Amino acid sequence: MLTSILDLAFPQPCLLCAGPDSGRPGICQPCLQDLPWHLHDTCPQCALPSQHNLLCGQCISLAPAFDATFSLFRYQFPLSGLLQQFKYRQLLSLAHTMGNLLVEHVPHIPVADCIIPMPLHQERLQERGFNQSMEIAKVVSARLHIPVDFRTCKRIRPTPPQASLPYKQRLRNMQGAFECLTTLQDMNVILIDDVMTTGASLNALAKTVKAAGAKHVECWVIARTFSP
């Protein structure tokens, strides 16, 4: 309540145009409308473009371990710049904006037992100082009253940055990267990450979660890229 009152009394400038924030903390309404939204004509399993929201050929031929994916945006300018600032310049206020947008635009709210943010290896966490996926997950959890489980799944092997690697190399990098410390038997799980590129990291995490007994796994991401 206090935060809402302060936002009204002292609106913060828009992160994109530096103009007055018109209600959405961090991004003004005109800039929000200009972001590269990705809410329609997507594959329900991997969120790649697909006419009429039909399952794409890639998921038909080689189904990922996760059952569904929801993405807010295409990973394009200016959103890409915002997410880079979020991750590498600790623009933590963006977690509040993006977490709320996820909740407000997801087509349906699943009956979920827990939210698992994409784990960072301890070395990466110490370098960065925070886990951006965890920050988003906290906001989603508070809105939906679904607990965040940040203890069960760990990244046990450090992996090099994935962004510039080809898809097959990403898959090799992610083998054995995660482990679950407790059972997730018959649970419905939401995985949260900031960006899905090829889906290799989320696929590896979903495999690990399902091996621990999870019944249904879906991914919620802020942005989706369309090329490896």
Image (spheres, grey):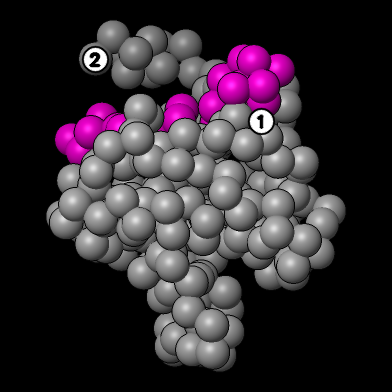
**Of the pair 127 and 3, the residue shown nearer to us:** 127
> Which residue is found at the position 41% from the left and 17% from the top?
7
| 83 relative position to 110: left or right | right
Residue 127 figure quarter: top right
Q: Vertically, is 117 above or below 129?
A: below
Q: Locate the N terminus by quadrant.
A: top left
Q: Which secondary structure lies at badge 2?
A: loop
> Which residue is found at the position 30% from the left and 33% from the top?
148
2 part of magenta stretch? no
Q: Position of residue 147 (x, y in %)?
A: 23, 33
Residue type at tag 2: Met
Magenta part of the chain = 122-149
- Residue 15 visible? The answer is no
* Residue at the right extreme, as displayed: 164
Q: CA distance from mark 2 to mark 1?
A: 27 Å
142 part of magenta stretch? yes
Q: Locate the C terminus by quadrant.
A: bottom right
> Which residue is found at the position 28% from the left and 9% from the top?
2
Picture disc at residue 1? 2
Q: Position of residue 194 (x, y in %)?
A: 56, 44
Q: Decide which of tag 2 and tag 1 comes sooner along the chain.
A: 2
| Callout count | 2
Main SS category, magenta section = helix
| 148 relative position to 146: left or right | right
- Residue 194 visible? The answer is yes
Query: Which residue matches tag 1?
Result: 87
- Closer mark to the observer between disc 2 and disc 1: 1
Residue type at tag 1: Lys
